[in-house]
Image (cartoon, rainbow, N blue to C red):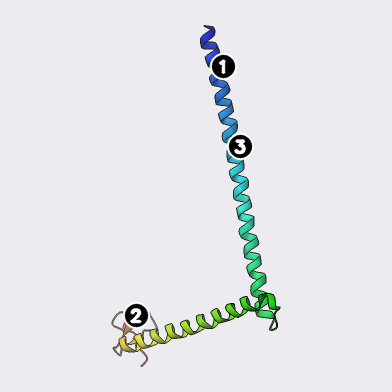
Amino acid sequence: MSFFDDLTQKARAVAATAGEMAKDAADSAKISAAILAEKREMDKNYRAIGQWFVCEHDEVPDAVADLVAAVKASQEKIAQLQASRDKAMEEEQAQEGTVCPVCGKISAAKFCPHCGAPMGQ
């Protein structure tokens, strides 16, 4: 019987070691996730600082002048794209009709075919 007793003790020792290793791995994963969450929060704060700096300061140090110029160029490009999108949507609506003030559907009729409200032309 001593063979089976030794085998049982070794199996218990291996199981205990495996359990400890699994617990250590889980703890390590939790710590890694917490570190990653803090890094994301820090990056968010850095972005907020940078956004504030660009908005508040007209004169910027030479070290960041290129980056600020690139941000301002991107802001102008976004404004142009939004204006062209709005213009395209207005043209599309003009071709299709007007938007019903009650239900929001588009129609070229004097009265909305969906809800019957006057289109307000």
* Amino acid type of the residue tagged 1 in the rendering: Gln
Give left or right: position of 87 versus 109. Answer: right
Q: Depth-wise, is mark 2 or mark 1 nearer the camera?
A: 1
- Report helix, strand or loop for mark 1: helix
Query: Dots 2 and 1: beta carbons under 8 Å?
Result: no
Residue 116: quadrant of the picture: bottom left
Q: In which quarter of the image is the C terminus?
A: bottom left
- Report helix, strand or loop for mark 3: helix
- Report helix, strand or loop for mark 2: loop
Q: Name the residue tied to disc 2.
A: 105
Q: Name the mark on residue 96.
A: none
Q: How crowded is mark 3: few (under 14 residues within 10 Å), some or many (20 or more)?
A: few
Residue 118 position, x and y percent, is 34, 88
Q: Which residue is drawn at 69% across and 78% down?
A: 62
Chain-order first, disc 3 or disc 2: 3
Q: Nearer the viewer, residue 60 or 54?
A: 60
Residue 9 position, x and y percent, is 56, 16
Q: Residues within 10 Å of mark 2 (few under 14, many from 20)?
A: some
Q: Nearer the viewer, residue 94 or 99?
A: 94
Q: Name the residue tied to disc 1.
A: 9
Q: Name the residue tied to disc 3.
A: 24
Give left or right: position of 2 versus 119. Answer: right
Residue at the far top in the pictured view: 1
Q: Which of 16 and 72 is in front in this view?
A: 72
